[in-house]
Image: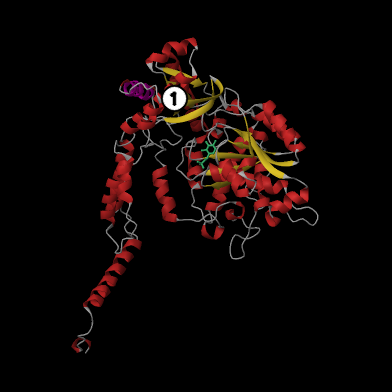
């Protein structure tokens, strides 16, 4: 019957949109269906091939200007119809993958991101497939105790407490040995949040800073202001923490460092006394174990003692340097870290895990109770819901990477990785000292090297220690150009920073080339190649003496 009814007024558009809807439905259902026979789909095979070819590329990047890549991403309209996954992958390969940085390249030795062990790729696929949300047990079950176990292993590496201690706390819902965050930034912020709440807690009829706010808390305890103290080389995540906690950036007190980039202890002691005299609450003293610029480690033992005497929370930012604890030969450099109230370590740096694994550890398993939040429908009191005492809410099961690495790589494996990174740094430092083209600027403590290129006209003066301020400026300009040119060519890479404290003393701004030797794939001949590339690149650059020239040449740079 239906077919016989004529509906002449029905617009064609509607007919086509109905057909379209059916098509959308079938496409969508296909997107959500799982292949039953377990074989790899064509798409999966292609992605695997793309990843393999990406990982095998030795060059650091293409020499295409970033501006022309930016132009490819200026359309803000959401595509209307679903499209074929294969077509999208073609687009992705061409526009994104081709112009991404080969952070695993053995000649990419400028940042803290490097090669990953191969098991993280299939594991990543499993984590995505399982899509656990570790905010609560109801969406993660086994992942929650598994994460707690991995964190306890790392806690033990730092604090070395007894079997009894770990037996008691490892799965005790009221204890928090550590927490995972997406990175060192959030781990540091979490630590500062705990320190603030612990130092301005509830007392008598005052319910604590978390509930009543900072002004009321300072008022109740009779403080004028609250501060955080660390060295000038503190990571900028502490500025974020100070801003968010409402103490203000300017109350992040930065103590000068010595020429080896370690905090000046005399100045620290003086500042602590001054803060007390000024009636300022010191929320935390921050020590750095492996500072981002140079890898330097603060004198943690002495700092711990200063903090203890002042009854102040001591936090160690070991985002970079923490895993040095795996090395029998080098762990003494971090002596005192075990006295810290809290410690940050990044899994995605020297633990060779994918991005998104920051960790904060607490000496006192009850410390994190001061940031506890619960919700009635989820994240319940008394449960081991991990979201109770973390800054983040929904979170992926990334701790599985950590758990896997601790099992597969093991203590000895990490020790080997740390030791060989430091050994390669010594190799490169020696080359820099031997080659007249280069100058070492700071003695490396672990595996970050700061050096610079000295153009020929200044080499004599450098040797005699006769560089003037103007000479320094010209050399600075040359090194900026050199690093830009090297990055643009894309064969090798080191990063660049500006230092206030070097072998030239304090207060002189020196542009430095920065090498981070952490990639297990980097060999001595790769290090030779990076320095040779710099010498060859430098030979093609004009030796500049005027600031105007420089301003013109780097006008479009970052
Ligand atoms: C990398 C780093 C951080 C920040 O960590 P993210 O993972 O980038 O958020 C903090 N402190 C130090 C010393 C670092 O090296």
| Residue at 39 percent of width and 14 percent of height | 457
Q: Quadrant of the N terminus?
A: bottom left
Q: Residue at x 27, y 46 (%)?
A: 94
Please state the horizontal and vertical placement of residue 81, each as a whole percent of the image. Answer: 29, 64
Q: Is residue 45 visible?
A: no
Q: Identify the image quadrant of residue 459.
A: top left
Q: Position of residue 322 (x, y in %)?
A: 56, 34
Up/down of 297 relative to 245, above or below: above
Corner quadrant of residue 207: bottom right
Q: Which residue is mark 1?
A: 476
- Judge whether 464 appears above or below 12 on screen: above
Helix, strand or loop for disc 1 = helix
Q: Residues within 10 Å of mark 1 (few under 14, many from 20)?
A: many
Q: Nearer the viewer, residue 528 or 175?
A: 528
**Quadrant occupied by the C terminus:** top left
Nearer to us in this view, 26 or 497: 497
Residue at the right extreme of this rendering: 204
- Is residue 324 among what the camera can see? yes
User: Which residue is painted at 48% across and 25% down in the image?
Assistant: 449
Whether 541 is among the magenta residues is: no
Q: Nearer the viewer, residue 254 or 410?
A: 254
Left or right: residue 471 compared with residue 209: left
State the extent of the magenta-drawn residues as a range.
526-538
Instruction: Name which quarter of the figure residue 522 lies in.
Output: top left
Q: Is residue 527 magenta?
A: yes
Left of 220 or right of it: where is 232?
left
Point out residue 189 in the picture as x, y percentages from the top left corner: 59, 45
Name the spot of residue 218 as percent of width and height, x first. 73, 49
* Way the structure is coloured: secondary structure
**Total numbered circles:** 1
């Amino acid at each position: 019957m239906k077919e016989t009814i004529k509906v002449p007024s029905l617009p064609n558009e509607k007919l086509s949109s109905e057909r379209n809807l059916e098509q959308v439905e079938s496409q969508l259902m296909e997107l959500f269906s799982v292949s039953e026979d377990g074989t790899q789909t064509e798409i999966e095979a292609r992605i695997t091939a793309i990843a393999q070819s990406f990982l095998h590329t030795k060059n650091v990047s293409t020499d295409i200007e970033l501006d022309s890549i930016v132009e490819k991403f200026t359309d803000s309209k959401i595509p209307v119809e679903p499209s074929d996954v294969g077509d999208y992958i073609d687009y992705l390969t061409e526009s994104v993958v081709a112009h991404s940085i080969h952070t695993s390249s053995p000649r990419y030795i400028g940042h803290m991101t490097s090669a990953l062990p191969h098991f993280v790729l299939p594991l990543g696929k499993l984590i995505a497939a399982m899509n656990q949300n570790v905010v609560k047990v109801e969406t993660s079950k086994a992942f929650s105790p598994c994460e707690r176990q991995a964190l306890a292993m790392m806690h033990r590496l730092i604090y070395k407490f007894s079997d009894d201690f770990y037996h008691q706390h490892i799965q005790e819902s009221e204890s928090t040995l550590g927490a995972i965050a997406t990175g060192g930034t959030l781990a540091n912020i979490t630590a500062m949040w705990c320190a603030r709440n612990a130092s301005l807690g509830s007392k008598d009829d005052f319910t604590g800073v978390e509930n009543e706010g900072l002004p009321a808390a300072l008022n109740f305890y009779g403080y004028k202001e609250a501060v955080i103290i660390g060295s000038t080389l503190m990571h900028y995540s502490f500025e974020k923490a100070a801003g968010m906690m409402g103490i203000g950036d300017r109350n992040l007190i930065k103590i000068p460092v010595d020429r080896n980039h370690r905090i000046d202890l005399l100045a620290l002691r003086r500042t602590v006394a001054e803060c007390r005299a000024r009636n300022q609450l010191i929320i935390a003293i921050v020590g750095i174990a492996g500072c981002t610029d140079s890898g330097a480690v603060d004198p943690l033992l002495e700092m711990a003692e200063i903090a203890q005497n002042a009854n102040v929370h001591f936090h160690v930012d070991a985002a970079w340097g923490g895993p040095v604890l795996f090395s029998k030969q080098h762990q003494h450099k971090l002596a005192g870290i075990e006295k810290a109230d809290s410690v940050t370590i990044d899994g995605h740096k020297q633990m060779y895990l994918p991005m998104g694994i920051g960790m904060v550890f607490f000496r006192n398993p009850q410390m994190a109770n001061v940031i506890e939040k619960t919700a009635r429908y989820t994240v319940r009191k008394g449960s081991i819901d991990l979201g109770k005492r973390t800054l983040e809410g929904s979170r992926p099961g990334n701790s599985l990477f950590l758990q896997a690495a601790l099992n597969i790589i093991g203590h000895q494996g990490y020790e080997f990785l740390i030791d060989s990174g430091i050994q390669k740094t010594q190799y490169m430092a020696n080359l820099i000292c031997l080659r007249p083209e280069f100058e070492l600027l700071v003695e490396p403590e672990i595996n970050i090297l700061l050096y610079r290129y000295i153009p020929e006209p200044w080499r004599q003066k450098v040797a005699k220690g006769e560089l003037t301020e103007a000479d320094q400026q010209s050399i600075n300009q040359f090194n900026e150009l050199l690093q830009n040119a090297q990055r643009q060519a894309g064969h090798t890479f080191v990063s660049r920073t500006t230092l206030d404290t070097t072998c030239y003393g304090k207060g002189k701004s020196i542009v430095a080339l920065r090498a981070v030797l952490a990639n297990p794939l980097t060999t001595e001949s790769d290090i030779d190649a990076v320095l040779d590339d710099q010498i060859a690149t430098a030979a093609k650059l004009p030796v500049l003496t005027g600031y105007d020239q420089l301003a013109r040449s780097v006008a479009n740079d970052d």
